[in-house]
Amino acid sequence: MYFRTMKKISVFASGGGSNLQSIIDASEKGMLNAEVALVISNNSSAFALERARKHGIKAIHFSTKTHPDPAIYTQELIKLHSDMKIDLVLLAGYMKLLPKPFIALYSGRILNIHPSLLPKHGGKGMYGHFVHEAVIAAKDKESGVTIHWVTEEYDEGPIMMQRSIPINHDDTPDTLAARVLKVEHAVYPEAAALVLSGQIRFPNRFTEK
Ligand code: GAR
């Protein structure tokens, strides 16, 4: 007889947290063999924190306001994750950069979701609505969702999974955002499950220098 221990996820979110909700729902349905143990937001009024609390998940406002000293900020973030034995970190609409020592410690165990087909429409200032505006302005034929590993280069981490959708001739940034978000809610739990089960691993060529 053996016991499968439940893995632990932390989710970082700055806003509404609909992706966080999709991860919580997948976990509660037993699709992940993992629980969302911790939710962190840089924004004290983020609805994501409320969503977490409704599910009895530890939800913390963690920012330069709560931790003005960058060294202590980093130290506390690392301590919290190691004390709680977090296995996987998911960025879900998190608009801040993570400290480099944290990324180094969790290398190969941090994923981000981006609402376009990276490397198109990524990088600084490209988040949420700005992404969909840029996609429409570029008259692209398709858009979609990218899940990528987070490295110190941030948006340039290796792509783990992509799902594309066609762009309709009458799409606006809002209609496109809504359709992409629906795909995000399906794809992120799928990606998390593949990493948690060890079926997909961080590519070695990024760790071997
Ligand atoms: C999502 O569309 C996510 O892909 C995007 O922010 C939204 C958050 O929505 N992330 C980025 O643009 C990151 N560059 P949510 O708070 O409802 O999950």
Image: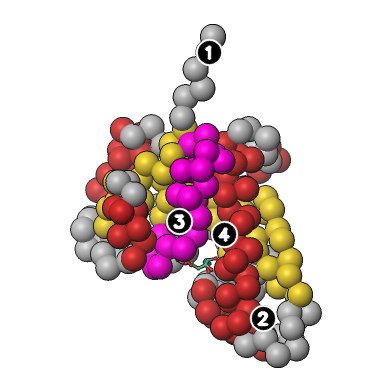
Would residue 7 appear left or right of 59 to someone viewing this image?
right
How far separated are the C-alphas under marks 1 and 2? 49 Å
- Dividing the picture into quadrants, the one containing residue 170 is bottom right
The residue carrying mark 1 is 2
Quadrant of the image containing the N terminus = top right
Asked if the residue at tag 3 contacts the one at tag 1, i.e. Cβ–Cβ closer than 8 Å, the answer is no
- Mark 3 or mark 1, which is nearer the start of the sequence? 1
Instruction: Give the residue type at disc 1.
Output: Tyr
User: Mark 1 or mark 2, which is nearer to you?
Assistant: 1
The residue carrying mark 3 is 20
Find residue 160 and report its horizontal and vertical position in percent: 67, 50
The residue carrying mark 2 is 135
Furthest-top residue in this view: 1
Badge 3 residue CB within 8 Å of ligand 1: yes
Mark 1 neighbour class, 10 Å CA radius: few under 14, some 14 to 19, many 20 or more = few
Instruction: Give the residue type at disc 3.
Output: Leu
- Mark 1 or mark 4, which is nearer the start of the sequence? 1
Please say which color scheme the image uses.
Answer: secondary structure
Q: Secondary structure at mark 4?
A: helix
Magenta segment: 13-34
Instruction: Give the residue type at disc 4.
Output: His
Q: Secondary structure at mark 3?
A: helix
The residue carrying mark 4 is 185
- Mark 2 or mark 1, which is nearer the start of the sequence? 1
